[in-house]
Amino acid sequence: MIAMVDFDTLTIDELEDLRNECSRRILEMRQTKGLALPDLLHLLEEVKTTLQNQGKEWYSLERWQWMDGEVRFWLNPHDQSSYRTGWFSMDDLIAWSQDRGMIIIDDDFDDDLDDEPKTTTFGSQTKWRTHASDDNILNMHNGPLIFTS
């Protein structure tokens, strides 16, 4: 069903909301499995534009590498109290644009972290935490990024 919209009657906020919803829906419909690297990098630019339109910012979302059988992208978000830092798949980034998935810090999800496997990178195990209350936490650079092993 196609709705007829008179764009001339919409406010700037309504037009931005419409743009964001269109971008989210287009990303949701994209197939990410089996894409060649150039196509994946092109899709990354679309995802970044959608995220920027939503006001989501990051220090880094440029680096990529082959991990666990797929291309993953390094995300270091500005708002580290709401979003996780780490290596994420294209599907994870698309889910973030839809305000769901593993990038978003959810207290209910964090309570289940002890049941989840730890991330293994270069032979060391890392478990991401959002609170600095545990005794065995090393707070790197006095910043919000916290590691345990």
Image (cartoon, grey):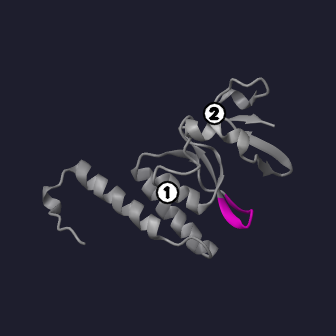
User: Does residue 67 appear left or right of residue 32 in this picture?
Assistant: right
Tell me the magenta residue range: 64-72
Q: Secondary structure at mark 1?
A: helix
**Amino acid type of disc 1?**
Lys
Residue 131 visible within the image: yes
Q: Label 1 vs label 2: CA separation?
A: 24 Å
Q: Which mark is residue 64?
A: none
**Amino acid type of disc 2?**
Thr
Determine which residue is flagged by label 1.
48
Q: Position of residue 108 (x, y in %)?
A: 57, 38
Q: Which mark is residue 130?
A: 2
The residue lying toward the viewer, choosing from 66 and 24, is: 24
The quarter of the image holding the N terminus is bottom left
Q: Quadrant of residue 83?
A: top right
Q: Position of residue 20 (x, y in %)?
A: 35, 56
User: Does residue 140 appear left or right of residue 73 in this picture?
Assistant: right
Q: Secondary structure at mark 2?
A: loop
The quarter of the image holding the C terminus is top right
- Residue at figure coordinates x 60%, y 72% from the top left: 33
Q: Position of residue 87 (x, y in %)?
A: 67, 53
User: Does residue 124 appear left or right of residue 79 in this picture?
Assistant: right
SS majority, magenta: strand
